[in-house]
Image (cartoon, helix red, strand yellow):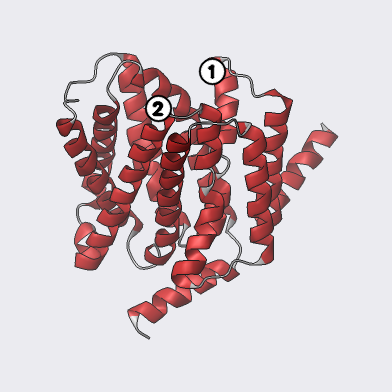
Amino acid sequence: MSATAACRAAIVRAVKTKTSPPALAALVLVTAIWGITFVQIKDALALYPLFAFLAVRFAIAVAVLAVPAARRLPSLGKQGGAAGAGLGLLLAAGYALQTAGLDRTTVSAAGFVTGMYVILTPVFGLALFRIRPDRAVWLGVALAVIGLAMLSGVAAGSVTGDLLVLCAAALYALQIALMERFAPRFDPLAFTTAEMIAAFVGFSVIAVAAGQVELPRGWTVWGALIVTGVFASAFGYLVQAWAQQRTSAARTALVFALEPVFAGIFGFALAGDRLGAVGWIGGAVILCGIAVAEPAAAGTLARLVRVRRSA
């Protein structure tokens, strides 16, 4: 069997099989980490330039992964190295576009539009690789989009800002869809390290060009850099690479739809934000979407409900 045929077979197996509970739990944990970083990043960017922050964030991620990945990087070869660098640059471009859009639109509009990668991911998978998610996944995606709309309020923003954020969502979706192809073929640690190196180089070039070269100062900035560099970047994307050997891109995107839910929870607990009744219902609808598409998630939710009733 050729490498391409083997890759295709691995992807088809991932789509036809349900997500393993460990992979599902790992993706939820990563999404929770991404959710809590909203509060930290918001505070840090009030004190430190954006692109300098992103460059240092990914420098920390590279430093964390470099030692354990050093011996594995040669296993990528030219093809794997190029693929990892390409996906890393996709992530970097997505972060840059999303931030530029946030400067021009409302937070609620940006939150909803960013969440569109939930539906764009299976679309890319279908268009690029002719992978057809089953009906349960499409139903879960539809529920997730409805929940995102309720969570974000779909407030009107500027056309330019919303388009920039939509482009960022498309890049995030493309990264997840392409990971479905590359994850079964390459070592997760080596591949993630290649992604982080590419993102670091990209943001460093932008930071220098923008004149944002200065040392971080203060615990607020350093705390955000450590959490985002170590856990949200190095650990987060390593888990994604590992989990997508065991699930599909569409299901990964569905779990990632929990990010604004966790952001709302941690914003409520740490920053005094209030979602309101509609926002919390939206979060519940997103959970329903994941439960519909993922029997493992549905079983866990059912057990939690039984435990709560018996308490």
Q: Amino acid at mark 2?
A: Asp
Q: Quadrant of the C terminus?
A: top right
Residue drawn at (35%, 16%) of the image = 46
Residue drawn at (45%, 62%) of the image = 245
User: Which residue is outermost to the bottom?
Assistant: 1
Tag 2 residue: 103
Point out the tag, 1 or 2, that comes first from the N-terminus.
2
Which of 298 and 273 lies nearest the eye of the viewer?
A: 273
Which of 29 and 217 lies nearest the eye of the viewer?
A: 217
Q: Looking at the rendering, which quadrant does residue 18 occupy?
A: bottom right
Q: Rate crowding at label 1 as few (under 14), some (14 to 19) or many (20 or more) other CA atoms within 10 Å.
A: few
Indicate the secondary structure of the residue bearing disc 2.
loop
Indicate the secondary structure of the residue bearing disc 1.
helix
Closer to viewer: mark 1 or mark 2: 2
Left or right: where 218 falls relative to 163: left
What x and y, as percent, mark residue 246?
A: 50, 62
The image shows residue 105, relative to residue 85, as above or below, that is above
The image shows residue 53, relative to residue 235, as above or below, that is above
User: Which residue is outermost to the front?
Assistant: 159
Q: Looking at the rendering, which quadrant does residue 264 occupy?
A: top right
Residue drawn at (52%, 73%) of the image = 12
Residue drawn at (22%, 43%) of the image = 202
Tag 1 residue: 270
Q: Amino acid at mark 1?
A: Leu
Tell how many labels: 2
The image shows residue 84, relative to residue 66, as above or below, that is below
Q: Rate crowding at label 2 as few (under 14), some (14 to 19) or many (20 or more) other CA atoms within 10 Å.
A: few
Would you say the residues marked 1 and 2 are in contact, meaning their CB atoms lie under 8 Å apart? no
